Amino acid sequence: MGSLTYDLTLAGLAVGSAAALTGIGLVVTHRATGVLNLAHGAVAMICAYVLRQFVVAWGWPVPAAAAVTLLVVAPGMGLLLDRAVFRPLSTPAPDPARTLVASIGVFVLLVGAAALLWGTGARSDAPVLLPDAPWIQLAAVLLLGCAVGAVTRWTRFGRGLRAVVDNRELAALGGVDADRTAAAGWAFGAFTAGLTGVLLAPLVRLDPYGLPLLVLEVIAVAVIARMRSLPVAAGAALAIGVAQAQMARLHPGGDAESVVQSLGANLFVVALLVAALVLPGVGGAGGSVARAAAPPVRIPWPAWPVAAVLFLLPLGFAGSDPGTAVQVPALAVVLLSLVVVTGRGGQISLGQAAFAGLGGLFTVLLAAGRFPGLPALPVPAALAVAVLCVTPLGLLTGWPAIRRHGLALALATLAVGVGVSRFVFEQPYATAGLPVVARPPGLDGDRAYYAVELAVLAGALAAVAALRRGRTGRALAAMRDHEAGAQAAGVAVPALKLLAFAAGAALAALGGGLLVLGVRAFDPAAFDPVRGLLWFAAVFVLGADNLMAPLLAAALLVGLDAGTEPGVAAVVVGLLAALSGLRRRTARTPAAAGTAPPWLPATEPPPSGARTDALRA
């Protein structure tokens, strides 16, 4: 028993040390730049692939390959991200909404690039940097943490770093080189990401999706540390790692066995849920992500008949089997949910894939008679009941939105998406033995089913268009433009946020059910959190408050996935999202200040008297 405890502790320290490195890197990057780098896990994955390329494909010795990867490639990626993406967004002052979307774009871009370069299959031959040496990893973490703490606390650079975070413009006036400080933070953060990736790769599968998501879950330790305390981040990581390893000893038997096993395998996810939903939020209030969006594609009214004709083409030219075209209307309904939550309500929602997946899963379970407490239902009724069951779950993200904004809300919605994926979609008790989905009579052919999807999409578009008008539409727009001013004008902001998230969950569930019926099977990978980030970025770059954006994004994503190599869609969308903030920042240079576009005012004044009167009408 003592030997087992010791072995499990060593295994927990190995994972906890890698998590501690992630926490240290995220905290330092945030303290140097004010950015919560959601792309940290993608950088870790790229570095792990680069090390494998050097060692396995090109035959380099491990020490030389590790030195080049960690001391050249990783810091170089950090400096490139700082110079090309995030430094322009920090002038004159960082905008949390834009930097958040930029980091999501970088995440999606790197994941897609890895899929293109190395394929989507899992690799089990990642080089081992420190074989069976958790104590060495722990010593490295402690040494690194002490060194960083000493530098930030007792050196001139550390004082400059704190000044840059507190007020970048004032620090520059005081003689602090803010750009150099931010570059150092990005280089160090990328170094820790690379070290995390090469340490974790031999312990888990190395693929473009698994490793970035695993590191993304470890953000919990940085959130627990309030993005400030290095000792708290490292201590939380080590404690969670050891506790997760020790839980492998628990075998309660019966129905509790699978629950305990899933908790033990995903304790970092539990920590992320608690940190994001229960602990005080991090990252400040931030700005409205809808107003931070790139300029929406200005589409004249004749484009709608053109779009209608294009969506009708599969009915006339694809015979009885439109093939992958059946996925486009269903995905458009899912993406339309982001127009409601983000475009109209100005709220960040990174967990819509979870609601879409739950809609699809519940539809299958209800139709098969496997949903607890309910008999088997006809497919249309199963889809309707699934939407009704998922809608209240939207309040799970809507409730934190009442008191959270910006980065804190992004983390809360991301945590919900990751939690649903890990504890529902990936668990045998929920998805094992699911039957093939049978469509309703008369809709067996893809052509007939596609026509029904188009009708549902048209109804969803009409409902969202109606939501944009009237008193509710004006109230949502006021909340998005200036939440405090809208509340002062008498707008019931909490209720509106709950309405937006509930409506968004319902639309996502409806689209997810249609997707599953379209392909006749439930695939958990189709609704993982990485897919949710991709969907958010796609709608964002095309204009979050544009009803045409979901149609364009769905056609783009499905078309690129079907007609090109895996990863092309993620590369295109990620690149557009990463660079979208640069176009917006250019539009707000002093020379153009007098011609700022109406959807992004240069300041955030409270609603005018006319707006206030309209809200009360």
Image: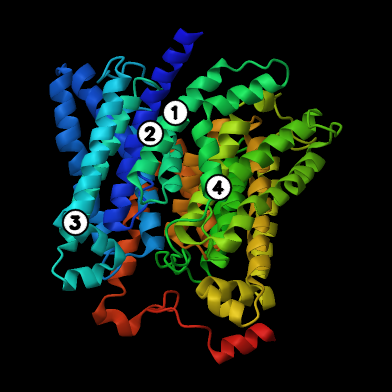
Which residue: 41% across, 47% down?
225
Whichever of callouts 2 and 1 sits on the residue coming sooner in the sequence is 2
Q: Which mark is residue 181?
A: 3
Q: Which type of secondary structure does the marked residue at label 2 adopt?
A: helix
Q: Which mark is residue 19?
A: 2
- Asked whether disc 3 touches disc 4, contact meaning CB atoms under 8 Å apart, the reply is no
Question: Which picture quadrant has residue 238?
Answer: top left
Whichever of callouts 3 and 1 sits on the residue coming sooner in the sequence is 3
Say which amino acid is labelled 2: Ala
- Asked whether disc 2 touches disc 1, contact meaning CB atoms under 8 Å apart, the reply is yes
Image x and y of residue 579, in percent: 31, 57
What residue is pinned by disc 1? 241
Q: Which mark is residue 351?
A: 4
Q: Which mark is residue 362?
A: none
Question: Which picture quadrant has residue 76?
Answer: top left
Whichever of callouts 3 and 4 sits on the residue coming sooner in the sequence is 3
Which residue: 49% across, 50% down?
411
